[in-house]
Image: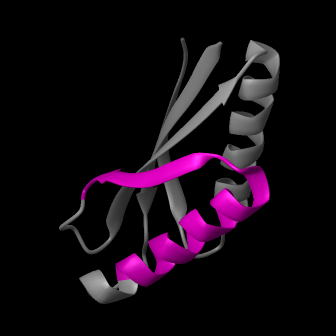
Amino acid sequence: MVVCTCLVSLHIPGSGSLKAKRLVVRRLKDRIRNKFNVSVAEVDDLDLWQRATLGVAVVSKDGYFGQQVISNVIGLIEAERNVNVIDIQTAVR
């Protein structure tokens, strides 16, 4: 069993309140969950209006498959026009 994880720090320039930020983050998390069947949660920067950190986890039998899924998730996040990616950290265990 292999666990692939990813932390993605985001800047949300159009957000003027926590409510607006959470709307953007919730929609992004729902898109990621529905498309890739992974675990995703907002794990840091909860009280900042224009920052968010998402944690993504994939458990698979094959490490290569898990890394491909994480790579595809990162691609989806980078293509999102409402957010800017600040930092990405990945790990395979």
Q: Position of residue 20 (x, y in %)?
A: 37, 87
The answer to whether 23 is drawn above or below residue 83 in the figure is below
* Side of 76 relative to 3 (left or right): right
Side of 65 where 54 appears, left or right: left
The residue range painted magenta reads: 21-45
- Position of residue 52 in the picture relative to residue 90 (left or right): left
Determine the residue positioned at 42% across, 76% down.
13
What is the magenta segment's predominant secondary structure? Answer: helix
Measured along the vertical axis of the image, is residue 57 above or below residue 17? above
Residue 64 at least partly seen: yes
Q: In the figure, residue 21 lies in which quadrant?
A: bottom left
Residue nearest the viewer, comparing 63 with 71: 63
Q: Is residue 74 above or below residue 46?
A: above
Residue at (53% x, 68% y) in the render? 83
Residue 12: x and y, percent? 43, 71
Q: Quadrant of the C terminus?
A: top right
Give the image quarter of residue 3.
top right
Q: Quadrant of the N terminus?
A: top right
Instruction: Based on the picture, tell me whether residue 65 belongs to the magenta stretch.
Output: no
Does any portion of residue 14 appear in the rendered image? Answer: no
Q: Position of residue 26 (x, y in %)?
A: 48, 73
Assess whether residue 32 is covered by the magenta stretch.
yes
x 55%, y 64%: residue? 29
* Picture coordinates of residue 31, whole percent (x, y): 67, 67
Foreground of the two, 60 or 9:
60
